[in-house]
Amino acid sequence: MFNRSALAWLASGDRIDREAAARLGRVLRNKYHDCWLADVLGEIRRGQISARSVRALKDAAEANARGDPESALREMEKVEIGRAGTAFRLRMDFERAYAMHRSLRTRECLDAAERLTEELSNKLYPWLKGGAEIEHATCAGLLGREGQALSELRQDEQELRQLGFLDLRLRAEGIGADVQTMAGNPWAVWPTAEDVLSEWWSSTAAPNRAQQVLFDLSQASEYLDYPYAAYAFGREAADAMVETPNRLTEALTRMHAAALAEAAGLHEEAMQQLRRSRDLFGRVPESAVTFKYRLDADVAVAGAQLAKGDARQALEQLEESKRQSAEAPTFQIEFQRAAIAGIAYADRKDTAHAEQALHEAIQLESARLQSLPEKRERLAAVSESAPVFHSLVKLLLTQKHDPRAAYGTWVEFLSAGEQESIEKPEKPLLPASGTWVGYVRLDDRYMMWLATREGVRWLRVQASAQEIDESVRRLLSFAADPISNTSTMEREATWLYEQLIGPGRGFMRVNEALVMVPDGRLTELPFHLLQNLDGRCLGDEYAISVASALRRADTEPALIRARTTALIVAQPSVGKSLAQRFAYLPDSAAEAESVRKYFPVSVLLTGADATLQRIEEMNPMPEVFHFSGHGFSNGGHGALVLAGDSIRSPSFLTPERISGMNFRGCRLAVLSACLTATGERQGPSNPESLVHALLMAGAREVVASRWSVDSSATRQLMERFYAELAAGATTPQALRVAANAVRRQPGHEHPYYWAAFQVFN
C-alpha cells in the first residue's frame, strides 16, 4: 500500500505520477482513513520537502527492500531534516528503525520504534503506526522480551485485521509465530502457518510473507527434532525469496538451510545451498555487514567439506577465507576457523598444527565465556565447542598417547559451562568416594574411563559406536513399551553390559556409589537396566546417578529433616484446547498428598492455582520442589505443563523460565511426569534440557524420567522414594529401593513401570 511504487511516484516529479499518487491518496483516506500519502503530497506542494529528500527516502526504502540496511541508512543522511514536513519525517523514521533492525542494531531499533509509535499515536497514519508497532515488538523479542513481544503482536494482528491491511497483518502473524517458537511453544507455528499460507496463496501479498512463515516452520521443525522437515521448509523459505529483490535475506536463508541440511546428513544439499549463498553474497553491495556474512559462508563451506571427509579441501578453503580477511571480523568466524583447522589437521595426522589450532579454539571459547554473565548462555556456547574437545581428546589418546592430558581436557569440557572460563585443573579431579564411569565418543568408537580416588584409567569399548548406539536405541524403545518382549530386551541389556561395563568391572568399588558420565547416544541410556550374565541389573548392585559437570558429582545427599521446606505442584488444570493432549491424571493429587505429609512446612499448588506466576513468586525456591503432572519433550527441548487456557497461549515451565529463577537453596527437584529427562540425549551442554536448567539454576539433584510413565506406578514409586529419603537414604539409594519395590509388585515387573526415573547431578 505505502510501497516503493508510491514513493517512486512522489520522487519522479512527473505530472502523471503525481496525479496517480494523489488519486491513491484519496482512496487511502476515504477507504482506510489513512491520510499519510495525502499529507505528504501537501507537504511537497508547500515546498516543505525537497526533491532530493524525496529521492533519498525512495532509495532508502528500496535499499531496505533488497536487504541492504547500511545503504538505507546512508541514503537517509541525505534528507534535509530542517525542511521536512511531519508526515515525510515519520516515514523516514520508520525506514530508519527498520534498517536498524535489519543491521542488528536491536537496541537502537527498539528505542527508535518506541519514539515513533508514541508520535504516531495522535496521527491518522494507521499503516505507518502498524509497521512501527511490529518493529517495536520484533526488536523486543530479539532482546529476549518474548512475553512483551507476543502481547504487542497479538494486538497488532487484531487492529490490522480490522483495518484490512493484509500484508502487514501476515507479517505480524509470522513474526509472532517465530517469537513463540523461540519462547518454547513450537506448536503455535502450525495453525498460524496454515492460516497465513492459505491467505497468501489466494492474495497478492508479498513473497516475504511466505518466506517468514516457511522459515518459522523450519525453526519449529528443528526445535522438535525433525531434521529433514526442518531442511525442507528452510529450502522452501529460501526459494520464496527468489521472487523478491532481497538477495541478502535469500543468501542468509540459504546459509541457514545449508546448516539444516548438514544436520540431516545431506552433505551434497548443504554444499549446493552454500554455493548459492556465496554467489548471492557476491551480488549484494559491499558493506561491513555483508562482508561479515560472506566470510561466514566461506567458513561454512570449509565446515561442510570437513563433514564430507575432505580435510585437505577444508584447509584450502580456510586459507582462501584468510586471504580475504586475515583478521576475522567477529569471534564466531575466528573460532570456527581455528576449530575447523584443528579438526582437519588432526584428520591428516598433523599433530603439531592440530594441537596448536585446537588449543587456540579453546582459548577463544574461554574468552567468550568470560563475557557471558548467565550459566545458560555459557552452556549454549560450550555446546558449540564440543567437536573441538572431542578432537583434542582423540589426538591426545591416539597420537600423543597421553591419557592423563586427555582426562584433564575432558574434565575441562564437562566443567566449562559451570565456570566463567575454561580452566585446566592443576591436578586430576577425582571422586572423594565411589567410582566415576565415563565415556567419550571418538568417531567410530567409544572410549571408557574410570576415576576413583586412586586415579584414572582409560579402556577401549570393543564394539563400534554405531553398534552401541543402535543397541541403546533398541533397549530404550523396549523399556518404554510396556508390552515389549522382556527376553529380547534382556539380551540387549546383557550385550550392552558386556560392552560398556565389562571392561572396567574389576576396577569399580563394590557397595559404593556409581556416577555415570555419558557421552554421545549413551546420554539416553538407563544404565541401571544393564544386566550381567547372571541376570542381575547394574542397578541391583549400585546406587547410580548421572553427572554432567564433575564438580557436582560429589553433591551432598538431599536428606529430609523435620523442617525441610517444599513446593509441591500437582495436576495443573488446562483449557479445553489442551485437555485432549494432556489428559487428567487420576493419581497426581494422591501422589501430592503422600509427598506433602513429609513436609509440614510446604506449599501445595493444584488445579487452577498451579500457574507459572505462582511458581515464579517462590523466590527463593524451597529445599524440595516436587512436580506431579504432565511433561513433554521436543527433541530435547522439555517443559512442564501448568494451568493455562489454550495452545496459542499455554502456560509452560520451560528451561528458559527456570534459568531466571532462584533454585540455589533447592536440594532436590523431582519431576514426576513424562519425558522430563529426554533432554539428556543431547549431552552435558544442552541448555534446553529441564534437568540442566534446574541444575544451572542451583538445584543440587534432579530426579527425572526417561520416557512416558504410568501414573499409578509412579505414585507408588514416589511414596516409597520419599519414605526412604525420610529414613536417611541418599537420593540414588532411595530411588533404587523404590524402583525395586514397584518391580516386585505383580503386573509391574516390566521396566516400563519402575525404571524410567534417574538421579542427575
Image (cartoon, rainbow, N blue to C red):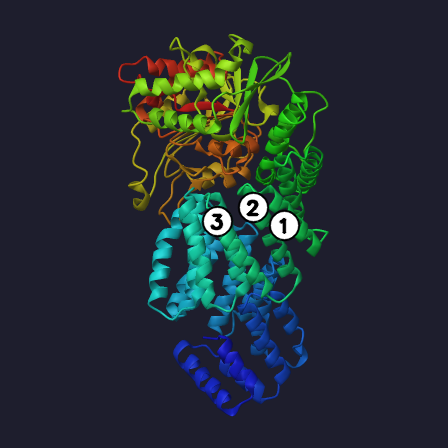
Does label 1 or label 2 sit earlier along the sequence?
Answer: 2
Which residue was labeled with disc 2?
305
Q: Residue at x 54, y 55 (%)?
A: 140
Does label 3 or label 2 sit earlier along the sequence?
Answer: 3
**Could you tell me if the residues under marks 3 and 2 are in contact, i.e. CB atoms within 8 Å?**
no
Q: Is mark 1 on a helix, strand or loop?
A: helix
Question: Residue 206: horizontal and vertical position, in percent?
Answer: 43, 68
Crowding near the residue tagged with mark 3, few <14, some 14–19, many ≥20 C-alpha atoms within 10 Å:
some
Crowding near the residue tagged with mark 2, few <14, some 14–19, many ≥20 C-alpha atoms within 10 Å:
many
Q: Quadrant of residue 114?
A: bottom right
Foreground pick, 307 / 243: 307
The amino acid sitting under disc 2 is Gln
Whether residue 277 is situated above or below residue 530 in the rendered picture: below
Crowding near the residue tagged with mark 1, few <14, some 14–19, many ≥20 C-alpha atoms within 10 Å:
many
Question: Residue 81: horizontal and vertical position, in percent?
Answer: 66, 77
The amino acid sitting under disc 3 is Glu
**Could you tell me if the residues under marks 1 and 2 are in contact, i.e. CB atoms within 8 Å?**
yes
Question: Residue 492: horizontal and vertical position, in percent?
Answer: 38, 20
Which residue was labeled with disc 3?
268
Measured Cα–Cα span from mark 1 to mark 3: 17 Å
Measured Cα–Cα span from mark 3 to mark 2: 10 Å
Which residue was labeled with disc 1?
317
Q: Is mark 3 on a helix, strand or loop?
A: helix
The amino acid sitting under disc 1 is Gln
Foreground pick, 125 / 688: 688
Q: What element carries label 2?
A: helix
Q: Which residue is drawn at 44% across and 55% down?
A: 235
388 with respect to 182 (left or right):
right
